[in-house]
Image: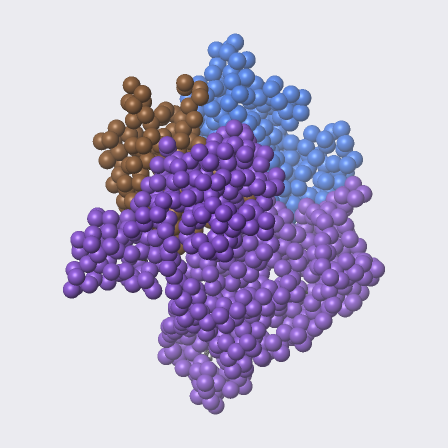
Chain colours: A blue, B brown, C purple
Amino acid sequence: MIYGFFPGCAYQAAAGYKESVDAVCGLLGIELREIEDWNCCGATAAFSRSQKEALVLTGRLFALAARQGFEEIVTVCNACYSTLKKAAKLLDGQPALLEQVNRVMAAEGLLLEHPLPVKHLLEVMLRDRSRLSWPRGECRLPEQVKVAAYYGCQLTRPWQDVPRALRPDILESLLEAAGIEAVDHSARTLCCGASHAVAYSGRCQVLIDRIINGIRAKGGNLVTTVCPLCQFNLDQGQQGRAGDKVPVTYFTQVLGLAFGLPPEKLGLKKLLVPLKRIGL
Amino acid sequence: MEASFEPKIIALVCNWCTYTAADLAGTSRLKYPANVRLVRLMCTGMIDVKYVIKALLDGADGVFIGGCHPGDCHYINGNLKARKRIQGVGSILESFGFEPQRLALRWIGASEGPEFAHHMTEFVNTIMQLGPNPSKARMIL
Amino acid sequence: MNKEIPRIGVYVCHCGMNIAPRVDVEQVAEFASRLDHVVVARDYKFMCSNPGQELIVEDIKAHNLNRVVVASCSPRMHEATFRKACRKAGLSPYNFQMANIREQASWVTDDSRLATAKAKDLVAAAVGRVAFHRPLQTRRVEVNKSVLVIGGGIAGIQAAISAADAGYKVYLVEREPSIGGHMAKFDKTFPTLDCAACIMTPKMVIAGQHENIELLTYSEVVGLEGFVGNYKARILKKPRYVDEDKCTGCGTCMEKCPTRRVPSGFEEGLAFRPAIYSPFPQAVPKTPVIDAEHCRLLAKNKRCGVCAKFCEADAIDFDQKPQYLDLTVGAVIVATGFAAFDPSSMVQYGYGIYPEVYTSLQFERLNNATGPTAGQIVMKNGQVPRKVAIIHCVGSRDRNHLPYCSRVCCMYSLKFAHLVREKTGAEVWSFYIDMRSPGKLYEEFYNRVQAEGVHAVRGKVAMVTDIVDDPGRGSLTVVAENTLTGRNLRLPVDMVILSVGLQPAEGAGEVARMAGISADGDGWFTELHAKLAPVNTPTAGIFLAGCCQGPKDIPDTVAQAMAAAGQATALLAAGTVETRAEISSIDPDICSGCKSCLQVCPYNAIYFDEGRQVAVVNDALCQGCGSCSATCPSSAAAVAQFNDSQVMAEIDAILA
Ligand SMILES: Cc1cc2nc3c(=O)[nH]c(=O)nc-3n(C[C@H](O)[C@H](O)[C@H](O)COP(=O)(O)OP(=O)(O)OC[C@H]3O[C@@H](n4cnc5c(N)ncnc54)[C@H](O)[C@@H]3O)c2cc1C
Ligand code: SF4
Ligand code: SF4
Ligand code: FES
């Protein structure tokens, strides 16, 4: 199946995200077709500078995607996801804003009638599972690996369409579909500090420690994330920790391992806390 | 002429639900267009088709009928009888030269003050779009 | 028939500042004075005041008026007042009509020109129709001397006792196996901290033994029709599978039943009960019920019947079937109470996820001497908590859930704070939005609890989580902002109590529908008037008591129950009620005998006179719905006060 894909700026550089997304999507029969000529979504920064500018950045993405024949936009990053969703809600509800954006985009010959639905890759995998070539075989992840699903705070907040937003379970459901029973823990949507981890590293370290401790307390020894920044913060943030580090992966890396894809195709080497800690 | 069109609307409402809802809209100070004139009846089930036709022939720009939600009628099922009767009127209206949209039937419960105000606004808007009662126009011609 | 020439007086009310100045009342009066048949038209500050009414009385005499129109508020408010004034001056109260220029004009219109124009139309309509009014006759009919009380909480119990003490027969219907309602679950009650059982149990016993009260527990009202003085109620008695007459209440069956692990609703899921059970030791009646869903024999068709084998009174009867009972009563008191808000949907508080998060009702049981821990406030592991958080307003004052204040939660939370301090010495942290203690001795109670060293933090809790920064200091963390200091707080605790709000009882909507009463947007039953008729409903003969009308504490509940009983017994004591005048009649000279009306009358109030070959209305049964008049092809049927000429005149006048 073909999806209109918005990779976002952090994706390429993220530790093994692209490799594992490519490998897993290849196996499942998902073709992520990049929106041609895409631009940065502006992330949280653009909205705090100027709503209008932020809406032009995002509006352009919607217009491009629509022109290229896509009916929805798939992302792999929480910040892209929430930025696009926020823009879609604003543009949908306020025709005046849409008009403003269209006036700017006219210079480029672009016209947006209405924003497109925005989905995380995780959501479309779950939704379209029956139409994908989902592997039948057994889960190849060794039993000693106890996966904890971590959502971060932006996937469900504030423009939430994800069910049970305060204690979501869609990632657990996806893992379960791959034969993985995730540990039940309460750190799912705690904030990792996001981009503040650079400027306020001290304060964000407290947040990161809390997440890792919360997961460890429930027996988790592998974290799986759905966002480049979350992965980076949780992985990097453990460098000062003593012996009780837990590897932090992307959900596509864990799925790849469960499906029995060769580890070298999943970019696992790029992780800071190495997987061999848990015998992988 | 167009801009100053102030339609006159006759609203035949039942005492138990819609009239009470109108009272609630009042006590809650909800504003809605002043074009509506309520005629209080005990139940929509007592609305004779001739009231509707007479109102339109006499120049009302719209007739609104409001009663209790199905199941809530104070007299068991007067509202359902009204619905049946009113459904039959549409075609008659057209033969008299009235657009069927000039007649509306809505269920508005006793606690639904905001809904009452909303339905009034919506119906007045519909009538504004339709323009004055055609029989009035004919009379002027 | 009615040859007299109408002489109409019109009175336009200012209602202080409510109608004037938005509606130009003087202009409306001047307009009215020029309408056909209007003899006098005046405006006056308060028509409903004594001088206002006197104005009408004097004018009727001085000007020989035979019709009156008052343009003021809703007829639902003051029609009775002005009709009385007419009657006082010797005029038939039915030769009167109200124009509602307050709720329908001044209060809902910003533009004063449009409001005035609308008011004029409404006055013209009233004048137009009143010319066609004529005096109506009513009769007095006997009132049935019994009362039906729906719901056996403290409200229903008190209402039943009060009415029964006044000498009337009372049927008290409760859907649970025992009466008692929520209060039966409490150990202590604020603000006096008196023992709930000590004040409640005697009332239950009185209700159970009163010669005038017939208890119908494990029963529900499934049909209610009729009218004031003469309601017909159909009661469904669910099968108990235990014969109430034979059972001695010894409890052997409950001890012997092999099905032991059914979560107890009365214990809020904190304990188990057998399949045959009585919800609590002081239950009234004592007769247990078999829960057919869990009984081995009834649900699973297994050979069991252990209870029957051990029952010495031979009271177990597996063949019992649902029974229906038809009652005729003069008045109905609705007392269906409330349901506690289910906090599972507020995932941030972790109820149902973390074992040490309790609802307030669970805490009531935990603290109760007859509860699952025999009144010890302990955690699931049996240990005494060292630090307890109480979260106020769970669900309440929250537009995602219950938008209103549930009124009792602040006070019962303070009660909990006191009990935890007293019984365990644990640190108590109360998180509130606003502390609401408006009631006799309530503020004093608040001060007392504060002095006991309870920490009160003003701030809504963001979340309760099992992520703890120091595992040694409690298994849960409460995350909140103290809005008085502006600081964020991460408080480690052992136990969290959620002070959940109150919402209407399950099935309240169905009860409202049957009783023909209305409920507000939140589902609470609506009283006739928020200030002046707090226990009456718009349906004569149906009264409200307790929390079904809105959240309230026990003193207010009991006061309202007594008031409802007072209203009901006053009605019964009067002995008769006036029949409605606004009923149908069929003109035999016009009736063609087509029988269409017989088909549509929902009350079977029309019969066919074979001799004269015409339909006739039975005026004792007719409710005046007008189905017949709208159906009659020859316009022979007409409802008084709503006949064709009256309604048409009203429409005519508006469109003139
Ligand atoms: C946790 C908590 C603690 C409280 N503590 C105090 C306190 O310390 N002091 C105080 O003054 N107040 C307290 N209150 C308030 C108190 O509970 C109420 O004021 C009181 O219970 C109201 O009584 P009621 O009879 O109106 O309602 P309920 O107690 O709810 O009784 C209603 C009864 O009607 C029955 N019923 C419902 N629907 C039907 C139906 N369709 N057919 C037949 N039967 C039906 C129910 O089964 C129930 O038995 C507390 C409330 C809570 C939630
Ligand atoms: S039949 Fe058996 S299971 Fe059912 S109530 Fe009696 S003893 Fe209990
Ligand atoms: S008004 Fe007519 S239809 Fe209605 S109850 Fe009376 S007789 Fe029956
Ligand atoms: S009483 Fe309202 S529709 Fe019948």
Q: Position of residue C532 (x, y in %)?
A: 59, 56
Q: Is residue B127 above or below residue C341?
A: above
Left or right of C444, for residue C135: left
Q: Nearer the viewer, residue A122 or B29?
A: B29
Ligand 1: image quarter: bottom right
Residue at 73% in and 68% down: C193
Q: Position of residue C37 (x, y in %)?
A: 40, 40
- Quarter of image, res C222: bottom left
Q: Position of residue B15 (x, y in %)?
A: 42, 49
Q: Quadrant of the N terminus of chain B?
A: top left
Q: Position of residue A222 (x, y in %)?
A: 63, 44
Residue at 62% in and 22% down: A51
Residue at 44% in and 34% down: C34
Q: Quadrant of the C terminus of chain B?
A: top left
Q: Nearer the viewer, residue C567 or A156?
A: C567
Residue C368 visible in the snapshot? no
Residue C210 visible in the snapshot? yes
Residue at 74% in and 54% down: C430
Left or right of A211, for residue A33: left
Count up the numbered dots: 0
Taking the view exactly as shown, the residue that stands out farthest to the bottom is C312
